Image: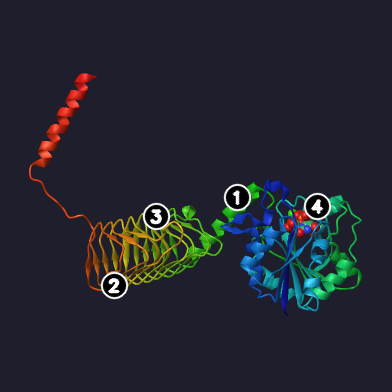
Amino acid sequence: MDTALIILAAGKGTRMNSDLPKVLHPVAQSPLLEHAMASGATLEPAHTVVVAGHGADLVRAAAQSFDETATVVEQTEQLGTAHAVAQARDALTGFDGMALVLYGDTPFVQPETLERMRDALAQHDVVVLGFDAIDPARYGRLVLKGDTLERIVEFKDATEAERAITLCNSGVVACKSGLLFELIDAVGNDNASGEYYLTDIIGLARDRGLSATVVTCPEVETMGVNSRADLAVADAAFQTRARAGLLEDGITLMAPETVYLARDTVIGRDSVIEPNVVFGPGVTVESGATIRAFSHLEGCHVSRGAIVGPYARLRPGTELAEDVRVGNFVEIKNAEIQAGAKVNHLSYIGDACVGTRANIGAGTITCNYDGVMKHHTHIGADAFIGSNTMLVAPVTIGSGAITGSGSVITSDVEPDALALSRAPQVEKPGRARKLFETLKKQKEQRQRKS
Ligand code: UD1
Ligand code: CA
C-alpha cells in the first residue's frame, strides 16, 4: 500500500520560550521536524504533507530542504489535531493508500514501528500507536475491549476509571486516506478543550462497525518535546541510543559518553573514535578509519584507513580518500585530499585538491579568499609543499613539484620544478654579539634613569 505522511507541525510551542517554531529546534543537530520526516521517509511515502502554522515560512523552508517534494499546507488557527489533519485533505485528493499521521515534535518513532503499523492496517481500518506510560500524566487513554480499540479519551474528558488506564496514545495514527478524511468530517469540538480531537475518529469508526487496533512501542519512541528541558533530554536519549548502535555495529568508541553524534552520522565497522569528537550533520566515515581526540567534523567524507586528528577540523565539502593523514590543528574545507596524502600539522586547506601522496608541510595555508571571491588551489600528485608555504589562489602546483619553506606562491608551478619565493638569507659575522652588547647597555641606561 502506498503511504502518505501527514506531519503535524503547526503548534507554537509556547513552553520553548523561543522565536523559533518548536519543530525547528534541533536534536542531534537536525530540526525535530527532520527526525519525524526521516523516520517516515523509510516507508518511501508517495506524499509528504507538513501542516505548518506558527512560523510557517521557516517550517516550509526546513521541510523542503530535507525533502524538496514535501507539500507544506498552512493551518492558520490551531483548532485541534483533527482540524490540523483536515488541512492535508486537498494535498491528498485522489490518494487512496495509507495516511500516516506523525507529530513534528516527536522525533524518535522508529521506522520498524511504522512498518508494524502499516502491516496492521492490512487487517484493520484504523491503527493507533500506543505505549505503556510509566507516568501517564495528561496523555490520551486508549480504551480497549480485547484487542479492539474502542475509543481514545483525552485526559481532561476522562473519568477516574479511565484515568487509571496506563496504555496511552502517542498521537501516531494510520488509516486509509479517504476514510480518514470522512471520519474527520464527523469530528466535533464538544469537549473539555473545545478542540477538534483527532482521537475522536476511533469512536466514530467503531460506531460504523469499522475495526480499530493498537500497535505498541517502547515509551522512549513516543517522547515529545515541549520545553528546552525536554530538548536536552531528547538529545541525551538520542546520543545514548546512537552510541549504543555504533558499538553494536563494530565501531570502537574509546569514551562513548564524550562522542557527540548527529542524526545522520554514518561510521563504518572497525573504525575507532577517540574521546571528545563532535560529528556535525552530513558525515560519513568508512570502515577502518581513526578519528582522534578533540576533532570536529561536519559535511565530510572520510575514507577507509584515514587518520584524522587529534584536534582536526573537517568542514563541509571535505573529501578524504583512503589512507589520508590529517593531523593536529588542521582545518580543511571544500577540498579533496587524494589517497595517501598528508596534511599533518597546523594548516588551512580550503577550496583545493591535493593529489595522491602529496605532502603538505606544517603551517601551509591556501589563501583562498580575496575578500570578495573564493579561489581554487590545485596540488598535483607527489608534490611536496614546504612548511609555511602561502598558496595564493587561484594557483596550481604541478605533480612532483616542491615549494620552499616560507614561500608565498602566487604563480603556477610546473611539474617537478622547485619554486622558491622568499628573501635571500644574509649573514653578518659577529653582529649578533655586538647587537646584544648594545641592547644590554641601553637597558642599563634606562634603569639608571628611572
Ligand atoms: C495529543 C493527543 C493525545 C496524545 C498526545 C501525545 C489529541 C486530541 N490528543 O494531545 O491523545 O496522548 O497528543 O502527545 O490528538 N497540532 C497542530 N495543530 C493543532 C493542534 C495540534 O499542528 O491545531 C500539533 C502540535 O503542534 C503537536 C501535535 O499536533 O505537534 C499534538 O498536539 P498537542 O496539542 O500537543 O496535543 P496533546 O494535547 O499533547
Ligand atoms: Ca503534546
Earlier-in-chain disc, 2 versus 3: 3
Earlier-in-chain disc, 3 versus 4: 4
For ligand 2, the image quadrant comes to bottom right
Say which quarter of the image contains residue 140: bottom right
Q: Amino acid at mark 4?
A: Ala
Whole-Å distance between the Cαs marked 3 and 1? 24 Å
Q: Nearer the viewer, residue 220 or 100?
A: 100
Question: Which residue is found at the position 34% from the left and 72% from the top?
Answer: 339
Q: Amino acid at mark 3?
A: Ala
Ligand 1 contact, mark 2 (Cβ < 8 Å): no
Question: Which residue is found at the position 26% from the left and 74% from the top?
Answer: 415
Residue 232 numbered mark, or none: 1
Q: Are marks 2 and 4 in contact (CB under 8 Å)?
A: no
Q: Which residue is mark 2?
A: 398
Across and down, in percent, residue 133 comes to: 72, 55
Q: Which residue is mark 4?
A: 164
Q: Amino acid at mark 2?
A: Gly
Whole-Å distance between the Cαs marked 1 and 4? 30 Å
Q: Are marks 3 and 1 in contact (CB under 8 Å)?
A: no
Query: Does the image show residue 168?
Result: no
